[in-house]
Image: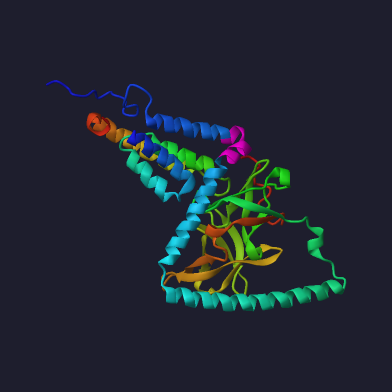
Amino acid sequence: MIRGLFVILTLASVAVFPWPVPAVLALSVAVYEPLVPLAAGLFADTLYYAPHAAFIPYFTLAGLLVSVASYLVRRRLRAGIIGE
Amino acid sequence: MRRTYSATRNALLTSAGPTWGAGALAFAVLALLARLIAPGAFLYAARPMLAIGNDLSAAGERVYSAFADTATLAAKNQKLFEENSALAAENRALLAELADVRGLGSPDASAKSPAPLIAGVVSRPPTSAYDTLVAAAGRADGVFAGMEAFGAGGVPLGTVSAVTDSFSRVALFSSPQMRTQGWIGAHRIPVTIAGEGAGSFSASVSRDAQVAAGDAVYVPGPGALPIGTVARIDGDAAAPTETLRIAPAVNPFSITWVMLRDTGATFAASATSTP
C-alpha cells in the first residue's frame, strides 16, 4: 500500500511540483516499480509538451531510459530481495 | 544447487496481478490519448491540479523570499520604487506625446490591428516543464497559432504554438529550443537570443561589440521591445566571442495573465494548431 501511495504521489507531483521533485520521486520508486519513471515522463509530456518548445519529448525519453535501467538491474539482481 | 529465483522472471511485472507501475503507465497512456483525442476536455480536467501547482510555487517563492536578508530586500525595494517612479514619469510623457501625434492626424497603427486578447495563465514555470504556458483562451476566443504573447508592460514572452477550442499553449522565448532574433544595447547590435530555460536567455557576440552588463535586449514586435537585460558576461579573454547571460524582463514564475496579439513577426507559417 505504501508503494501505491508513492506511485500516486509521483504522478500527482508531475502536475503540482517543478520537475526535479517528480524526477527524484520517480527515481526512488523505480527500485520497486520500474514502469513508474516511464509513466511519470509520459504524463509530464502529456501535460506540458508544446511544439517549438522542444524538438523531442525529453521527459518521456528520460523516463524510458530510467525504466530500462531499472528493468535491467532488477533482471540481474535477485528480484526477490528488491521487490518482495 | 537449487535455484532460488528464475532468471527469466519478468522484472516489470513482479507479482501475479497488475502492479502499481503498470497501473501508472496505463493512466499515463490514457491521459495521452485524452490529450490527442479531446485536448480541450483534457485541459479542463487537468486545470484544478495545475492551479494547485501554481499556488504551491507561489507559496514556495514567498517562503523562500522570507529567508532573504532584510537589508538586501529593503535596498532592492528602494531601487524598484525609484525605477517605478522614473518609469511612470516617462510613461506619462510618452502618453502625452502620443496624444499630440494623434492630434496632428497621423495614422494610428494600433487602430488597424485587431484588439489584443487577455488570457489567464493556467500553468506556468517552474511547474510547467519546457518553459511553456497554458493560457485559458483558445480558438473560440480568436486565438490562433503564431500569435505572440506579451506580459505586463508589453514585454514579449513567447509565441502560441498550439491551440484548442478553449486553451492555448505558449512556448516562451526562454524555452530551451527557442532561437529568437533580436538586438542588444543602444547601438542595436544584432544577436540570436537562445532560450536557456527558467526564463533566462543567452547570446553570443563578438568581443569587439563592447556589450556591458545592464544593456537592454530587444526583440522585434511593434518596434523594438525589451525582453531582458544582460546580467553577466562569460568568456575566455583569449576567445574572439563572449557569451551573454540575459535576465528576463518579466519573471515567468509569476505570470498570471498574458496578452495575445497577432504581430505577424513570428513563425506563424510553421506553427501548428494541433494539441
* Residue B94 figure quarter: bottom right
Relative horizontal placement of residue B232, taking residue B221 as reference (left or right): left
Q: Position of residue B179 (x, y in %)?
A: 57, 56
Q: Which color scheme does this rendered protein use? A: rainbow
Q: Residue at x 52, y 31 (%)?
A: B30
Any part of residue A49 in sight: no
Is residue B36 located in the magenta-colored stretch of the structure? yes
Q: Residue at x 53, y 35 (%)?
A: B32
Which quarter of the image is occupied by the C terminus of chain B? top right
- In this view, the residue in front, B258 or A66, is B258
* Residue B90 figure quarter: bottom right
Q: Position of residue B271 (x, y in %)?
A: 65, 46
Q: Main secondary structure of the magenta part?
A: helix
Which quarter of the image is occupied by the N terminus of chain B? top left
- In this view, the residue in front, A68 or A1, is A1
Q: Position of residue B192 (x, y in %)?
A: 57, 62
Relative horizontal placement of residue B155, taking residue B115 as reference (left or right): left
Q: Which range is magenta?
A: B35-45
Any part of residue B36 in sight: yes
Looking at the image, residue B247 lies above or below residue A22? below
Q: Position of residue B198 (x, y in %)?
A: 49, 57
Residue furthest to the left in view is B1
Q: Residue at x 66, y 75 (%)?
A: B88
Looking at the image, residue B14 lies above or below residue B272? above
Is residue B208 located in the magenta-colored stretch of the structure? no
How many marks the image carries: the answer is: 0
- In this view, the residue in front, B203 or B171, is B171
* Residue A49 figure quarter: top right
